Image (cartoon, rainbow, N blue to C red):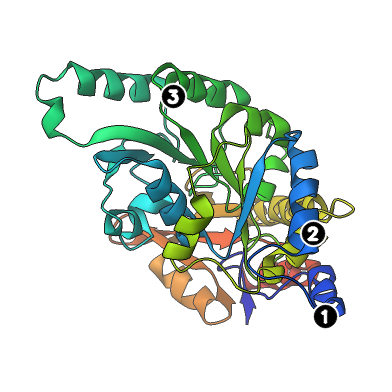
Amino acid sequence: MISFASDYLCGAHPQVLKRLVETNMEVLGGYGSDLYCQSAAAKIQAACACPKAEIYFLTGGTQTNQLIISAMLKSYEGVIAAKTGHISVHEAGAIEYTGHKVLELEGELGKLKADDLEDYIKTFFADENHEHMVFPGMVYISFPTEYGTLYSKKELEALAAVCHRHAIPLYIDGARLGYGLCSYENDLSLPEMAALCDVFYIGGTKVGALCGEAVVFPQGNPPQHLRTQIKQHGALLAKGRLLGVQFDALFTNDLYWHISQHAIAMAEKLKKILMAKGYEFFLQSSTNQQFVILDHKTMERLSSQVEFSFWEELDEDRSVVRFATSWSTKEEDLKVLEKLL
């Protein structure tokens, strides 16, 4: 059985695992005070061209989204997100569990549009009853989106301008950030992205780490006492080294970017194989997630030998499925899939 079901199904990149083993017997401070967390933070500051940035290491994406959003919102505020956004669909109400509402907006291929965001905020404050409503206090987007699409530099600048005009922070979920930034169609650099948002995270779980996400506040202005709030949420690891060592390895000798480039190269080959075999794409994605329309008989035939993710039902005879590549995808996997198709 070969798998294209997701990008976090293997353990860790061998170089990351090697560093965990090499540092295993070192006696280090706890709760992120160790030298590897400090080294990783410095390397991330350099990669983002944000020397004042503050970086916090957390173990997973849902945990990160819940913590950062709840820490940055006031009690009467909610977070704006696309209806297809991860926090709206696949996080089991984690944001609402903290007492904050996800304010859904229609997106286009997973993306929010600046004009729609502007209209939503203006309409809210124009309503004479807005004091009885949940205030828009933050904007959440994913890069890449849940549909593997990307915000262009122009689109992100437009969204950021709306957020800054209304003094609402812009938060970017970067669970697959490396795969987005290394896409052949991407026109944004990491420093440019950092300059346009108030907070984002660099995904490790899906990009070569056993687990872990690096939250970045580019201007060095996190919510007050954020570390205390991290502990309140049960998210402060005593062995913070687990995350520091991994991110220190990922940001040494451009490993994070090499990992991401490999996944994109594999995705491009996957796309060519699917096209050559005549499969229909649900949408065009230039990242590591490819969405294909399969009739149910083909789904049943393939699923006995290859893993992929069900995404949504298109009609009574067909469904949209996702094939995902990752840092661990091998050429041999693609060759086997090509024969099965």
- How many residues crowd around disc 3 within 10 Å: few (fewer than 14), some, or many (20 or more)? many
The amino acid sitting under disc 1 is Val
Residue 137 lies in what quarter of the image? Answer: top left
Q: Nearer the viewer, residue 207 or 289?
A: 207
Instruction: Describe residue 17's horizontal placement relative to residue 309 as left or right.
Output: right
The residue that label 2 is drawn on is: 248
For the image shown, how many numbered marks are present on the structure? 3
Residue 279 visible here: no
The percent coordinates of residue 253 (x first, y second) are 90, 53
The residue that label 1 is drawn on is: 21
- How many residues crowd around disc 2 within 10 Å: few (fewer than 14), some, or many (20 or more)? many
Q: Secondary structure at mark 3?
A: helix
- How many residues crowd around disc 1 within 10 Å: few (fewer than 14), some, or many (20 or more)? few
Q: Nearer the viewer, residue 314 or 28?
A: 28
CA separation in Å, label 1 and label 3: 44 Å
The amino acid sitting under disc 2 is Asp
Residue extending furthest toward the right: 253
The residue that label 3 is drawn on is: 163
